[in-house]
Amino acid sequence: MIKREETLPIKDQCRLLDLSRSSFYYRERPCNPVEVDLMHEIDKIHLAWPFYGSRKIRRELVNRGYSVGRGRVRRLMRRMGIEAIYRKPRTSIPQPGSHIYPYLLKDLTIERSNQVWATDITYLPMAHGFAYLVAIIDLHSRKIVAWRLSNTMDASFCKEALEEAIHRFGPPEIFNSDQGSQFTSDTFTGVLKANDIQISMDGKGRWIDNVFIERFWRSIKYEEVYLKAYQSLREARQSLHFYVDFYNQDRFHQHLDYRTPNEVYYGNPVAELAA
């Protein structure tokens, strides 16, 4: 357990325990159960129809028996970090003063592992609240190379996932993300620059680039999250750890010719076992 009286700094204790510092400093506030219930329903509607905006989501909620206005739905969607996926001028709002990098994937043929990684954040429903999940995916193999869970949508847990992925698998050639404040921050881009990774960010109308990570969100929620009601972040982390291992090692993917992400990433099952 982390102790403040230890001579070892808190950040080093968190690193040794594989714990996000934002999770350690966070002081849980009671969640409004009505709003939590609404957010869980919004998440399910958004996953089923990601092109629905606040108007249509509000209409669907009313059809399901909820009495809610569009303003409340829009506020909860912002809190969850979700929005309708469709072609539009802007997809994510960067932090003021952040540097936006050019989009590098146009007309690029992705044909090998560690050529391009991509990332995104999703809302994660729990029994008595919610959390945020970030994942990093290798676009060639669809392998999840790292993930992290957090109470807050700051940049620290995204940075920790990135550092773990690079430590375990080496740096990719290109790293693609949207223009969200977590990914445009100096905290996050500094790690990419330190490892000589080319930074690519979705530009106007590039909503389609999230399709691979969106498929993973759909899989993990319908096959894992919605089947359970996590009581705590610790329980969620343990359960998600087993699912991601299953997803990478054992789950066959039709678009990979019924191979697993690990088989594609490493080239063959024998290489994967040796690694």
Image (tube, rainbow, N blue to C red):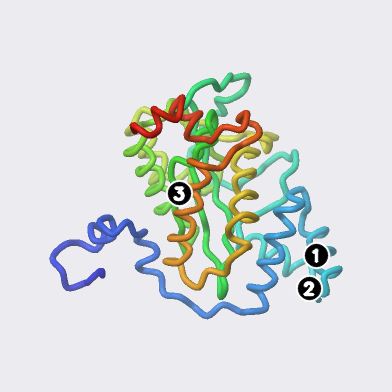
- The Cα–Cα distance between marks 3 and 2, rounded to whole angstroms, is 34 Å
For the residues labelled 2 and 1, the Cα–Cα distance comes to: 7 Å
Q: Position of residue 53 (x, y in %)?
A: 77, 54
Q: Quadrant of the C terminus?
A: top left
Query: Can residue 113 be spotted in the picture?
Result: yes
The percent coordinates of residue 211 (x first, y second) are: 65, 38
Q: Which residue is located at x 13 percent, y 65 percent? A: 7
Residue 68, disc: 2
Amino acid type, label 1:
Arg
What residue do we see at 61% from left, 46% from top?
A: 92
Q: Is residue 110 above or below residue 162?
A: above
Residue where numbered disc 1 is placed: 58
Residue 41 numbered mark, or none: none
Q: Which residue is mark 3?
A: 147
The number of discs equals: 3
**Dot placed on the residue nearer the N-terminal end, 3 or 1:** 1
**How many neighbours does mark 2 have within 10 angstroms: few (below 14), some (14-19), or many (20 or more)?**
few
| Element marked by disc 2 | loop
